[in-house]
Image (tube, helix red, strand yellow):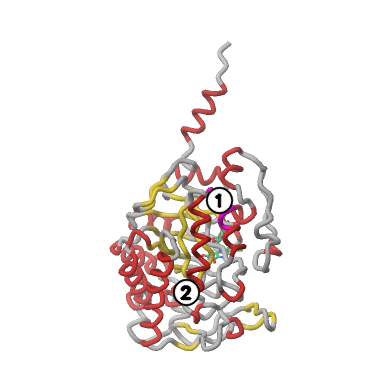
C-alpha cells in the first residue's frame, strides 16, 4: 500500500503563505506575520528600557514588529508610562530594542501615537499641553497614576503654529527612530488619536484650511506623511487607519467611505510603504464593510496589512485570496512569545491576561510561557 504522510506535509507547506518570506518595500521579512502595535505602559518616565527589549526580543520570530504607540512629542503622552521618541535618552533606550529584534531576524517599525485629546494633564510632563484640532473633549475616562480615573481633558485647539510644530515633531521623531536603528515608522492614523481627530468631523470643527471639507480634514495627516517621507524616505513610512472605527468617541457618519477613499488616493499618490487597516469588529466594534477593505486594495498599490481577530487559518485564507499582503496579530502575540512556532505546529496557545495589559513590571509581559 502506498503511504505518504511526507507528501501530505509537503502539500500543506506549499500551500502556506504565512510562513514564507515577504517583501515590504526594500525589506525582506522572514514571514507574513506582523505583530500589531500594542500599548503596554512599561516605559517608566516615558523612556524605553531593558524589560521592553526582552519583551520585543521574545516576539521577534514575527516578520515585522510594530511597536506600541510612541509619542513624537511631550504633548502626545496622553497615557501614563508610554514611551516617547523626542529626547536623546529615549533614542538611546530604543537602540537595544531594535538590536534585540534584529538579532532574531524580525524587522521593526515604531508606531507614532500622538494622543491629542485622549489625555489628561496629570499624565503629561511639565510644560506639555493637551492639544486637539478643536476644543472638544472626547467622551470617556483616562487613567492617571497620580489620581486614578479622570475625564478626558478638553484639548486646546491647535493654532497654525502648533500644527507646524507638531509636523516638525513627527519628522524629527522619524529621524530619531532611524537613528535608534529602526526600519521605519507607522503613523497612527487610527483609533481616535490626534491624526484621526483631524480626519473626523466630530472632533475637527475648524473653519481654517485644516477643517471642513475632507481635503481640509485630511491636510494635517498628509502633511505629517509628507514630512516623515522627506525625513526618512517613503519606503520607511507606513500608516494605520480605522475606517468605521468608533473607539475613543469617534462616531460613524455618512461620508465615511468617501472620506477614506480620498485618503486612500492621496496616500497612494505619496507612495507610503504600507497602509495598515484596523478591524475591531471581532472585539464587538461595528463591522468594517468588506467594500472599504477592497477599496483600499484597489486604490493603494503598495503593501496592505489587515488586522483584527486573526487566527492562522483565517490569515492563510485572506493571504491566499489576495485580500492583503501581510496579516497583523495583536493579543495572540501578546500572550505567546513563540506564536509563529505555535501556529506553524498547530499547537495550543496561551490566553491573554487582560488584567496585566497596562500594568507595570514583568508580570503578564515577559513571563508568558513558550512551548519549551
Ligand atoms: C493591550 C493592547 C494595546 C493596544 N495598543 C494599541 C496601540 O498602541 N496602537 C494601536 O494602533 N493599536 C493598539 N491596540 C489594538 C491592536 O493593535 C489590534 O488592532 C487589536 O488588538 C485587534 O487585533 P487582535 O484581534 O489580533 O488582538 C492594542 C490592543 C491591545 C490588546
What secondary structure is marked by label 2? helix
Q: Quadrant of residue 353?
A: bottom right
Which image quarter is the N terminus in?
top right
CA separation in Å, label 1 and label 2: 37 Å
Find residue 271 and report its horizontal and vertical position in percent.
31, 60
Decide which of 123, 154 is in the foreground and name it.
Answer: 123
Q: State which region is magenta.
A: 56-61
Which quadrant of the figure shows ligand 1? bottom right
Q: Is residue 207 above or below residue 360?
A: below
Q: Quadrant of residue 181?
A: bottom left
What secondary structure is marked by label 1? loop
Q: At 41% across and 80% down in the image, what residue appears?
A: 166
Residue 57 located within the stretch drawn in magenta: yes
- Reading the image, the residue beneath label 2 is 88
Q: Is mark 1 within 8 Å of ligand 1?
A: yes
Q: Which mark is residue 310?
A: 1
Tell me the crowding category of disc 1: few under 14, some 14 to 19, or many 20 or more residues within 10 angstroms, Cα based. Answer: some
Find residue 94 and report its horizontal and vertical position in percent.
51, 65
Amino acid at each position: 500500500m502506498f503511504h505518504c504522510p511526507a507528501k501530505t506535509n509537503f502539500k500543506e507547506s506549499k500551500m502556506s503563505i504565512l510562513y514564507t518570506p515577504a517583501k515590504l518595500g526594500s525589506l525582506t521579512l522572514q514571514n507574513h506575520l506582523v505583530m500589531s502595535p500594542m500599548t503596554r505602559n512599561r516605559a517608566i518616565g516615558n523612556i524605553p528600557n531593558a524589560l521592553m527589549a526582552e519583551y520585543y526580543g521574545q516576539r521577534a520570530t514575527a516578520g515585522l514588529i510594530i511597536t506600541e504607540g510612541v509619542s513624537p512629542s511631550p504633548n502626545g503622552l496622553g497615557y501614563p508610562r508610554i514611551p516617547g521618541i523626542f529626547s536623546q535618552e529615549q533614542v538611546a533606550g530604543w537602540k537595544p530594542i531594535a538590536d534585540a529584534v534584529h538579532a532574531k531576524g524580525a524587522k521593526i517599525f515604531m508606531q507614532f501615537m500622538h494622543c491629542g485629546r485622549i489625555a489628561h494633564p496629570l499624565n503629561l510632563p511639565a510644560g506639555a499641553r493637551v492639544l486637539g484640532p478643536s476644543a472638544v473633549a472626547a467622551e470617556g475616562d483616562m487613567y492617571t497614576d497620580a489620581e486614578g480615573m479622570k475625564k478626558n481633558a478638553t484639548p486646546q485647539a491647535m493654532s497654525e503654529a502648533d500644527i507646524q510644530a507638531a509636523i516638525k515633531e513627527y519628522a524629527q521623531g522619524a529621524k530619531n527612530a532611524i537613528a535608534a536603528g529602526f526600519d521605519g515608522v507607522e503613523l497612527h492614523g487610527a483609533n481616535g488619536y490626534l491624526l484621526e481627530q483631524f480626519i473626523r468631523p466630530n472632533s475637527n470643527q475648524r473653519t481654517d484650511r485644516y477643517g471642513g471639507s475632507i481635503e481640509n480634514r485630511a491636510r494635517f495627516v498628509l502633511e505629517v506623511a509628507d514630512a516623515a517621507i522627506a525625513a526618512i524616505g517613503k519606503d520607511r513610512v507606513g500608516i494605520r487607519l480605522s475606517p468605521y472605527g468608533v473607539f475613543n468617541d469617534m462616531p460613524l457618519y455618512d461620508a465615511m467611505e468617501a472620506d477614506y477613499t480620498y485618503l486612500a488616493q492621496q496616500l497612494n499618490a505619496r507612495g507610503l510603504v504600507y497602509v495598515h487597516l484596523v478591524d475591531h469588529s471581532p472585539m464587538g466594534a461595528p463591522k468594517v464593510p468588506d467594500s472599504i477593505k477592497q477599496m483600499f486594495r484597489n486604490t493603494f498599490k503598495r503593501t496592505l496589512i489587515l488586522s483584527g481577530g486573526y487566527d492562522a487559518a483565517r490569515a492563510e485564507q485572506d493571504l491566499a485570496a489576495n485580500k492583503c499582503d501581510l496579516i497583523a496579530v495583536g493579543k495572540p502575540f501578546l500572550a505567546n512569545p513563540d506564536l509563529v512556532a505555535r501556529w506553524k505546529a498547530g499547537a495550543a496557545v496561551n490566553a491573554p491576561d487582560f488584567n496585566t495589559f497596562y500594568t507595570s513590571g514583568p508580570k503578564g509581559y515577559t513571563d508568558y510561557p513558550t512551548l519549551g
